[in-house]
Image (cartoon, rainbow, N blue to C red):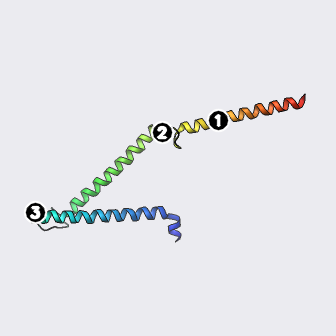
Amino acid sequence: MKLLRNYGLSVVLAILFLVSWLLQSTTGWVQFAAEQQSHGQQAQLFGPDGYFWAWMQATFENWQSEFLQLFTMVVLVSFLIHRGSQQSKDSDEELRAQLDEIEERIVRIEQATAGRGKA
């Protein structure tokens, strides 16, 4: 149970990945076997016309798509911003400007209060 508490996200994502990959493999095999049967051939797992090659192609196309999407997002995020988001530099700059303004007001109030105390 400590494993799930400490690494729950990783465990769940790994299970989801394996289940989806198993489903892709199973449904791909059913489709491949149906195509082979429609051509009057027997479905084979390995060999020059085996399912292994179609499975590898589908797997790498999916992974290529995901990595391309992730890479594109990383590149775009490093150059572009969404104003007001937590990652946006403008939010930090605006917050700093507000803090500076508050500090200036506090100093003016303290100076005004100190000036009245002397009189």
The residue wearing badge 1 is 98
Determine which quarter of the picture holds residue 99: top right
- Residue 17 at what x, y percent from top left? 37, 62
Between 79 and 84, which is closer to the camera in this rendering? 84
Would you place residue 17 above or below residue 73 in this image?
below
Residue underneath mark 2 = 82
Question: Is the residue marked by circle 1 packed among few (<14), some (14-19), or many (20+) residues within 10 Å?
Answer: few
| Disc 3 from disc 2: Cα separation | 53 Å
Left or right: where 14 falls relative to 65: right
Q: Is residue 23 visible?
A: yes
| View extreme (right): residue | 119
Residue picked out by circle 3:
39
Whole-number angstrom distance, CA of label 1 to CA of label 2:
20 Å
From mark 1 to mark 3, how far is it between C-alphas?
A: 72 Å
How many discs appear? Answer: 3
Left/right placement of residue 25 relative to residue 80 reads left
Quick one: label 1 or label 3, which is nearer the N terminus?
Answer: 3
The amino acid sitting under disc 2 is His
> Mark 1 or 2 closer to N-term?
2
Task: Find residue 94 and report its horizontal and vertical position in percent.
Answer: 59, 35
Graded by Cα atoms within 10 Å as few (under 14), some (14 to 19) or many (20 or more), the crowding at tag 3 reads few
Q: In the image, what residue occupies the spot 34% across and 62% down?
A: 20
Give the side of residue 104 with respect to residue 111, left or right: left
As drawn, 112 above or below 20: above
